[in-house]
Amino acid sequence: MSTQAHPHADASTARVLLGIAIAAVVAVALNAVVAFGATALNPNGTHMGLVVIAYAPLTVAGVLAGVLGWAAVRRYAANARAVLRVLVPAVVVLSFIPDFGLLISGMADVVNLVGLLVMHVVVAVVTVTAVSRLLPLTGYRRTV
């Protein structure tokens, strides 16, 4: 049996949901800037994944996946901070694999690829920033 000790009560569900929604909106907006920049740098190149109908749902899904992953690690890991310090960069790097597949298959060019890679990093940074405030790790301990 395990118990969790919190220095203060967890944030309300409404506050967490609002924070996640704001993070998703911010990530979509920043990814719009990235998509616009990549398209402007190479107007006649490929634009795979650089249109709002493609990246907006995936951005929201990435934010939600990041929140769920953070919450699971926070809940179950004995040293959540150490786990997340390794897990977050590893997941971001693994998320690059499909983008490189687009480059290899010829469905994307290098500018398109760089835009997509930056979008993945944007989602990770926005999500980690949001959840570190909404579901903080400080003082969170798991004892067995």
Image: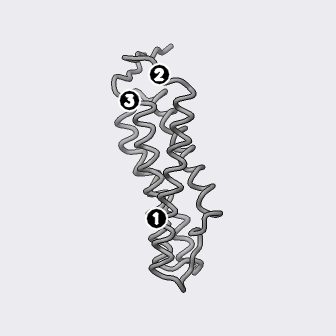
Q: Earlier in the sequence, mark 3 or mark 2?
A: 2
Q: CA distance from mark 3 to mark 1?
A: 27 Å
Q: Residue furthest right?
A: 53
98 sits to left or right of 89? right
Q: Is residue 114 left or right of residue 57?
A: left
Q: Residue at x 60, y 57 (%)?
A: 56
Q: In the rendering, at what x and y percent does residue 29 appear?
A: 51, 57
- The mark that comes first in sequence, 2 or 1, is 2
Hey, which quadrant is residue 104 in on the image?
bottom right
**49 or 143: which is nearer to us?**
49
Mark 1 element type: helix
Residue type highlighted by circle 3: Leu
| Quadrant housing residue 52 | bottom right
Q: In the rendered structure, find residue 10 and report the number of the disc placed on it.
A: 2
Quadrant where the image shows the C terminus: top left
Is residue 69 depicted above or below 111 in this figure? Answer: above
- Near mark 3 (Cα within 10 A), the count class, few <14, some 14-19 or many ≥20, is some
Crowd band around label 1 with a 10 angstrom C-alpha radius: few (<14), some (14–19), many (20+): some
Circle 3: element type: loop
- Please tell me which residue lies in front, 15 or 47: 15
Front in this rendered view, residue 66 or 85: 66
| Residue labelled with disc 1 | 117
